[in-house]
Amino acid sequence: MDRVLVAVLALGLLAGCGDGNPLSGSDDDTDTGTDPGTDTGTTDPIDSDGRLPPGTESPTPSSRIVRYEPQDEEAGTGMIRSPAYDRENDTFFVDNLAFDGNAPYSRDNQVGSLGPFAVYENAATVLDPVTNETIGQFTHKAIYAVSQSGQTELAIVRTGAYVDYGFGGFVYQRNGGVTLPETGQAIYRGSYAGLKDYSGAGGLDYVTGDATVAIDFEDFNDGSGVSGVISNRRYYDLDGTDVTETYLTALEEQYETDLSAVPDLVFKVGPGVADSNGEMTGELQSIAAGEVFESGNFYAILSDGADGDKASEVVGVIVVESELPGVSGVTQRETGGFLVSR
């Protein structure tokens, strides 16, 4: 589907950024908290025939699993399938997005990281090789994170260059297997970060927060019980300015109530959320003044650690939508990722 641009740019036909394996890195296994573990190969995407996003076909508890945002050209989602991280140069390759430069994304020069999540941006301009004329590019941001063990990682790419939601996507993966406990419960804590784009207006913002996931391995009978909370969310513009208070003021006016913080996103608990391969997917929402404010879905994978620690970490992505407080006719979409461990 064609998109309406926020700004009119000169027309040009440009190549996208380089190809790469899903979230693969170099063979250097030095872990810095934002770099991946070793390259573990590729997994071809498939069309999903169930509730899980497309990706690894016929997964098992012992297999590497890669999942992608479902592709919908009408909505602009699921357009990236093979991002790759270059550890040596600290650059990020993204393919299949128009007008995002013809070179790897580099560390953002204003907001280089959101806690343990690294932030990358595309080149602002490209030269026409024949006329030497400068062609402005659409602003894209990529967020990438890997666990300390290197066993789980994720990437999110969005743009605010369109009046509707722009083209982008997410990938999350487990690089090894998982040994699921048959009894007991576990709690996982860690960080959350993401991007917020808009339908009905251009623009892009960052979000940070804390993530907590709890798992009851004994019940439900058709899969473990899973609960989770994304809390302490803060919003920042692309310059890194904290705009949370402005956002809260608009939210308070909309719901005619006082709020001390952005409402938590809470997983809905119920059967059928988790499977025997360690994959989880379900719904989540936030509540403001007793009403549902945001709603959407979470997707996650449970993993063993690099040293054989059983079921020691979880990687996941959430996507929620809501009306933008204080602005009529604009919908906001928050796409965030979390890495949590025991």
Image (cartoon, rainbow, N blue to C red):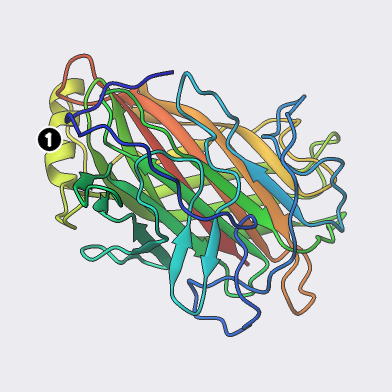
Q: Residue furthest front?
A: 130
297 relative to 226 in the view: left or right: left
Q: Nearer the viewer, residue 228 or 301?
A: 301
The C terminus, quarter of image: bottom right
Residue at image position (36%, 46%) is 100
Q: Residues within 10 Å of mark 1 (few under 14, many from 20)?
A: some
Picture quadrant of residue 6: top left
In the image, residue 335 sits, relative to residue 238, either above or below, namely above
Picture quadrant of residue 159: top left
Q: Nearer the viewer, residue 310 or 336?
A: 336
Q: Nearer the viewer, residue 70 or 62?
A: 70
Residue 323 in percent (x, y) is at 29, 22
- Residue where numbered disc 1 is placed: 249
Residue 83 in percent (x, y) is at 55, 54
Residue 223 in percent (x, y) is at 81, 39
Question: Is label 1 in a helix, a strand or a loop?
Answer: helix
The N terminus, quarter of image: top left
In the image, residue 13 sits, relative to residue 84, either above or below, namely above
Residue at image position (19%, 58%) is 240
